[in-house]
Amino acid sequence: LGIEFYDKELLSRAAKDSKICKELFETHDEKPTSSFLYSLVMDTYSMGYTNSAYMDMPINHKIFLAQFDTIKQLASEESCVIIGRCSDVIVEDAFRIFICSSFKKRVERIQRLEKEPEDIKKLESRIRAVDAKRRDYYQYYSGNEWGKPKNYDRCLNSGTLGIERCVEIIANSVTLE
């Protein structure tokens, strides 16, 4: 559709725009760090906003705000696809899509995509950990429950529909808007 796509690239742009070290964005990507001590230590490396309220804020909140600003800016400049990072609540007039699949199908898909086979138990554990971090991040910053259909305009099950059918449904939905 000729629409820009932002996922990890968003981190580089937010780092540049906010003048916060890119490595901090990678460390805190979709992770609501709850350790106050860790946030204080890591905060010594950050730069950017200088008002008192901002300076007293933990680094994970600063990272979220920098991503928030970047997402708002991107959405105001162009039609684009933004993956995760609470973009569905940040961009008010966004077309919100959630793609899910059964745990079993997700494990099978990742196994097919990986170049080096990973122990199945380690892979399952890694998937659960990533899901938990995404869920916690989303709920912490949005106040909504991650993956609940009421939060989205479309929810698609790629395990049932297949990836190509999901792409077709999304493309048809967007072109009808």
Image (spheres, rainbow, N blue to C red):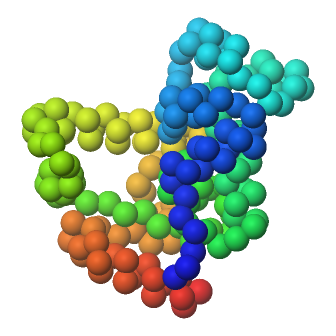
The image shows residue 167 at horizontal and vertical percentages of 37, 77
Q: Is residue 80 above or below residue 131?
A: below
**Quarter of the picture holding the C terminus:** bottom right
- 9 and 95: which one is in front? 9
Q: Is residue 45 visible?
A: yes
Residue at 65% across, 73% down: 79
The image shows residue 45 at horizontal and vertical percentages of 68, 18
Residue at 39% across, 82% down: 169
Residue at 57% across, 74% down: 3
Q: Is residue 80 above or below residue 139?
A: below
- 169 and 119: which one is in front? 119
- 139 and 80: which one is in front? 80
Q: Is residue 86 visible?
A: no
Q: Is residue 25 above or below residue 39?
A: below
Occupied quadrant, residue 106: bottom left
Q: Residue furthest right?
A: 51
Occupied quadrant, residue 93: bottom right
The image shows residue 56 at horizontal and vertical percentages of 78, 18
The image shows residue 54 at horizontal and vertical percentages of 81, 26
Q: Is residue 57 above or below residue 132?
A: above
Residue at 59% across, 9% down: 37
Occupied quadrant, residue 130: top left
